[in-house]
């Protein structure tokens, strides 16, 4: 039974080590904010952070996350004042919203590496797919979150 540190809490999960992290998070830990999209690490709906780096949880086995700190959308949104989440809400980014947890997690990882991304940096760094085509709103929200970080907000 592997133990995973998820959003700062240790979870003993009754899953096999080769189980995709996505299903361990959703089914065993009850954290359903991370979404299933494609199952082959292409769309990004399942993006989480493993030790601060964006990872596609549908293609990451639990074994690869043992001993690491996993952060899900629940961990990012828990405080209610995260600059990326605030920018998403302020700009009313999502249409259907299904991919947005993964988009937010990807944006957080991008901003952790590049606090002042250009449009090209955002386009290159945000490889998650949005079937509703909210890319312009996503880009605007990333710029807004970057401005909030520059003004002193914390990731």
Image (cartoon, rainbow, N blue to C red):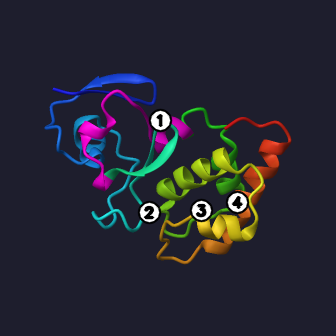
Which sits earlier in the primary sequence, circle 1 or circle 3? 1
Sequence-first disc among 4 and 1: 1
Q: Pointer 2: residues within 10 angstroms few (<14), some, or many (20+)?
A: some
| Residue that sits furthest to the right in the current view | 151
Which residue in the protein does label 4 denote? Answer: 141
Look at discs 2 and 3 and give the one toward the viewer.
3
Q: Residue at left 52%, top 67%?
A: 127
Report the residue marked by disc 2: 98
3D distance between C-alphas at marks 4 and 3: 14 Å
- The secondary structure type at the circle numbered 1 is loop
From mark 1 to mark 3, how far is it between C-alphas?
18 Å
Find the distance from the CA under tag 4 to the CA under tag 1.
24 Å
> Which is in the foreground here, disc 2 or disc 4?
4
Among the two numbered marks 2 and 1 on one chain, the one whose residue lies closer to the N terminus = 1
Residue 27, horizontal then vertical, whole percent: 23, 42
Asked if the stretch drawn in magenta spans residue 9, the answer is no
Residue drawn at point x = 36 percent, y = 55 percent: 35
Identify which residue, 65 or 8, lies in the foreground: 65
Q: Give the extent of the magenta segment.
A: 58-76
Label 2, label 1: how far apart the Cα atoms are:
24 Å
Quadrant of the image occupied by residue 123 = bottom right
Above or below 46: residue 138: below
CB of mark 1 within 8 Å of CB of mark 3? Answer: no
Report whether 66 appears left or right of 80: left
Name which residue lies at 44% across and 47% down: 48
CA neighbours of label 4 inside 10 A, class few (<14), some (14 to 19), many (20+): many
**Cβ–Cβ below 8 Å for labels 2 and 3?**
no
Percent coordinates x, y for residue 117 in the rendering = 74, 59
Q: Which residue is mark 1?
A: 51
Which numbered mark, 4 or 1, is in the foreground of this view?
1
Closer to the chain start, of discs 2 and 4, is 2
Q: Which residue is mark 3?
A: 125
């Amino acid at each position: 039974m592997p133990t995973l540190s998820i959003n700062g809490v240790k979870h003993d999960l009754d899953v096999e080590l080769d189980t995709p992290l996505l299903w361990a998070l959703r089914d065993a830990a009850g954290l359903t904010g991370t979404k299933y999209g494609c199952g082959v690490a292409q769309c990004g709906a399942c993006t989480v952070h493993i030790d601060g780096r964006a990872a596609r949880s549908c293609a990451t086995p639990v074994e690869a996350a043992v001993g690491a700190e996993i952060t899900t959308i629940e961990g990012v949104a828990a405080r209610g004042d995260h600059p990326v989440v605030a920018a998403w809400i302020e700009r009313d980014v999502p249409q259907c919203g299904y991919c947005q947890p993964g988009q937010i997690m990807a944006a957080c990882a991008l901003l952790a590496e590049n606090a002042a991304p250009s449009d090209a940096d955002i386009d290159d760094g945000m490889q998650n797919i949005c079937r509703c085509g909210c890319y312009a709103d996503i880009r605007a929200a990333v710029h807004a979150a970057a401005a909030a970080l520059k003004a002193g907000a914390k990731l």
